[in-house]
Image: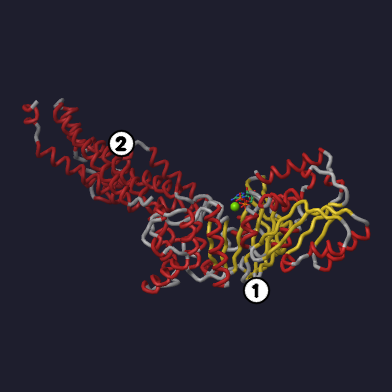
Amino acid sequence: MLEALQQVYWPEILQGTWDTILMTLLPLFFTVVLGLPLGILLFITSKDKPLAQPRFYAVTALIVNLLRSMPFIILLIILIPLSRAIAGTSLGVRGAIVPLTVAATPFFARLVENVLRELDRGILEACQSMGIRLPQIIVGALLPEALPGILAAITVTGVTLISYTAMAGAVGAGGLGDIAIRYGYQRFETTVLIVSVVFLVILVNIMEWAGQRLVRHFTHW
Amino acid sequence: MIEISHLNKVWRSGARTVTALDDVSLRIAAGSIFGIIGRSGAGKSTLLRTLNLLERPTSGSIRMDGQEITTLPHAELLKLRQQTGMIFQHFNLLAAKTVFDNIAWPLKATGLIRDAGARRARVLELLDLVGLSEHADKYPAQLSGGQKQRVGIARALASRPKLLLCDEATSALDPETTQSILALLADINRTLGLTIILITHEMQVIRDLCDEVAVIEQGRIIEQGSVADIFLHPRHDVTRALVAQSDPLLATILNPSRLGVTLPGLLVHLTYSGETTWQPILSQICACSPAQISILQGEVSMLKDTPYGQLLLGIQGEAADVAQIFNILDEHQVFHEIIPARTHAAPPAEASEDTENSEAHHA
Ligand SMILES: Nc1ncnc2c1ncn2[C@@H]1O[C@H](COP(=O)(O)OP(=O)(O)OP(=O)(O)O)[C@@H](O)[C@H]1O
Ligand SMILES: [Mg+2]
């Protein structure tokens, strides 16, 4: 067992772990930046909401659902040109950011929409009854009320991104997934496979733990 | 002064339509407490919500101090809403904000008080008014229902509104807390001269708080007037049922068939309010008339600030003696009504219909 562990090329594992962290956190950041407004937009344009736009909502929701139901591996391939245009490459950590963001954003936006929908509708009504403008209501009341739910949504999205990075590894993105596939699957080096999977599991757990702490910290009820 | 005229609200979903408001017209005097009572689904909330245009009426007009509000442009509408407070059955506080911030944030977000120091002073003043000064830094989840509604009231009053709308403000509270909230509302009405419009399905709330009342049923106003008038002389079955619900004694008077007695002589129902309540009317009657009088039922109580009494008398005597009694009653402005024998020995069919009705109203 020890012998086997000694054969593992640790610097590469550490590099892979770091790459996975980058490939999770950077797209997670862009996902929140893009997905939060999109989720809010879906919410306020849906039926019975202040800016109800049935047609706009239907089209946006359709696009969101299309992207969500597309297998990630296919999205990776389709997005190669887009990634080259935006990130300058479709390879390595840099090349993975665009497809990962595109995959996670609709998923996250839907989660945000649902979190907002599950807030008591009385909150929106009370704010409207006080003559507060919609942008203020969203920023000052709805988002703070939804914060625990949004943090939970970010956590779930982060975990999903970690598992996507493993897949992105298959098309040369690097990271723990890439190592697991190259050593474990192609060269039958089971120990490396196990080590990289264990590291992935640890990353997922750290993400969940941090998320839960934050949710609890911001929950006042 | 608020003048609602010919207000309609129709919900359309596909081919089905629901008429939530049907030609509603009301006048509400400035500074008064106006109650709107009705059964579940009668259209109370819809009516109240049209007053700050949370709900757009399908047609009709609402004038506040002469100004038509249904056609206000958006910016003006926001201003109108800032000058109209609203409190809710389920309080609708922001759970992520402290009590202090629940009141302070709207003042900031509307730009009504931009200076943080002035805002703080205003919030502390309001917390004092509703008796929550010690709870400023708590979150709503740490408060009782009554305390939450006090925060709701403080928040609604923060912008110094001229009008306060209350949507079943006490329906989620226990009777004792309800009393304290109603007392607070009455106090605010007196000290701030604020007009209060409240909706409720509980006659007790109307009795304790309101000056005027309108009864709504299936989107129509079926009866309106002073509380004493509607309460003591309900004309409509629905009103009777609502009155009965808050006062079991009245229920039996209004449904004499339940008495199950056959009396020699007349059954007379007396109603009086205000000054008359303190007059020694019965002793005057007895002194002047040889007729035999028995008190079968009675109550003396208060409607908000108005004392009132109701008596059910059995009177046996010559026609002339009875006429004399009625003269004395008329002199003292005591409303009297002979309850026909047919009604108090009602046939079973009618009696069972009565029971059915009142059960439906209680449900
Ligand atoms: N958004 C809506 N869409 C369709 N119908 C509605 C809507 N809101 C209310 N209604 C209907 O309008 C009628 C009046 O409803 P409203 O909520 O005003 O009654 P209410 O008197 O306040 O009842 P409750 O005491 O139960 O609150 C009901 O028949 C209700 O089903
Ligand atoms: Mg209602």
The residue singled out by tag 1 in the image is B66
Q: Badge 1: how crowded within 10 Å, few (<14), some, or many (20+)?
A: few
| Callout 2 amino acid | Ile
B140, above or below A172, in the image: below
Tell me the quarter of the picture where residue B319 sits. bottom right
Question: In x, y percent, where is residue B96?
Answer: 38, 55
Q: How is the image coloured?
A: secondary structure
Q: Locate the N terminus of chain A by quadrant.
A: top left
Q: What is the chain identity of the residue bearing mark 1?
A: B
- What x and y, as percent, mark residue B203? 65, 55
Q: Can residue A207 be seen in the rendering of this structure? A: yes
| Camera-side residue of B362 and B67 | B362
Element at label 1? loop
Q: Residues within 10 Å of mark 2 (few under 14, many from 20)?
A: some
Front one among B92 and A26: B92
Q: Is residue B139 above or below residue A3?
A: below
Q: Residue at x 20, y 36 (%)?
A: A178
Amino acid found under the numbered disc labelled 1: Gly
- Find disc 2 in the rendering and name its residue: A73
Q: Residue A65 vs residue B10: left or right? A: left
What is the CA distance from the residue labelled 1 to the residue labelled 2? 66 Å
Residue B109: x %, y % from top left: 42, 66
Q: Chain of mark 2?
A: A
Q: Secondary structure at mark 2?
A: helix
Would you identify the image quadrant in which residue B212 lies? bottom right
